[in-house]
Amino acid sequence: MCNSWNDCEGEPPGKDSELTMKLNEIGLPRQRKARKNKRLGRGDATGHGGTAGRGHKGQKARAGGYHKLGFEGGQMPLIRRLPKRGFTNIFKKDFALVNLDQLAKFSPGSEISIQTLKENGIIKGRHDGLIVLGRGDVEHALVVKATRVSKSAKKKIEAKGGRVEVVSG
């Protein structure tokens, strides 16, 4: 019988050896005991009685937490020192922007709309409409249904025999 891996003569220990480790046998090393959690507020016998490690009096010793988010010890908080700027238009439309070079992977004669672009992973998220811009070139005829199309994009699509349909957003 071998006491360690190096003591074994011949082949290393196999499945039936005493040196194999099982998951239920893994624990802390023999020389170290598991640390016990502090039992706070459970009387003097625990060694943490009286104030339970919070010290005497003061805001941090009281129940109900500490100070609120952004509190700076009574100094005027940064969020209140900075001026309010700008305006958020809640009626703003969010358009998906697509260039012609992104439409190159579609087959000839295919119909391109905001739904087909989402299905093919070209655009993600929610948009109110589609704008097609003229960067790049198309190789074949396409039917593009968009909210807006730039002049250069329209010219390039129609030059290849495709057509552009403007749909409402």
Image: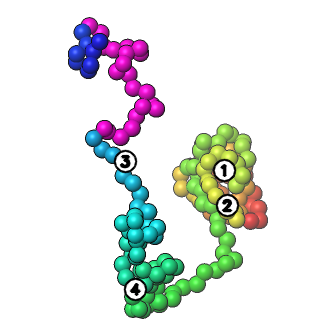
Residue at coordinates 72% horizontally, 42% vertically from top-left?
109
Q: CA distance from mark 1 to mark 3?
A: 57 Å
Would you place residue 143 above or below residue 97 in this image? Answer: above
Q: Is residue 70 visible?
A: no
Of the 4 image quadrants, the one containing the N terminus is top left
Which quadrant holds residue 5? Answer: top left
Where's residue 43, x and y in %? 44, 69
- Residue contact between numbered discs 2 and 1, judged by CB atoms under 8 Å: no
Label whose residue precedes the other's in the sequence (2 or 1): 1
Residue at coordinates 60% horizontally, 80% vertically from top-left?
88
Would you place residue 108 above or below residue 37 in this image? Answer: above
Residue furthest left as drawn? 6
Q: CA distance from mark 3 to mark 4?
A: 34 Å
- Please name the residue that numbered disc 3 is placed on: 34
Q: Is residue 13 visible?
A: yes
For the residue marked with disc 4, what is the amino acid?
A: Gly
- Please name the residue that numbered disc 4 is placed on: 58
Pick the residue in front: 122 or 125. 125
| Element type at mark 3 | loop
Q: Label 4: how many residues lie within 10 Å, few (<14), some (14-19) or many (20+)?
A: few
- Residue 152: image tag: none
Magenta segment boundaries in residue numbering: 10-30
Tell which tag, 2 or 3, sits nearer the viewer.
3
Q: CA distance from mark 4 to mark 1?
A: 60 Å
Q: Is residue 132 left or right of residue 53?
A: right
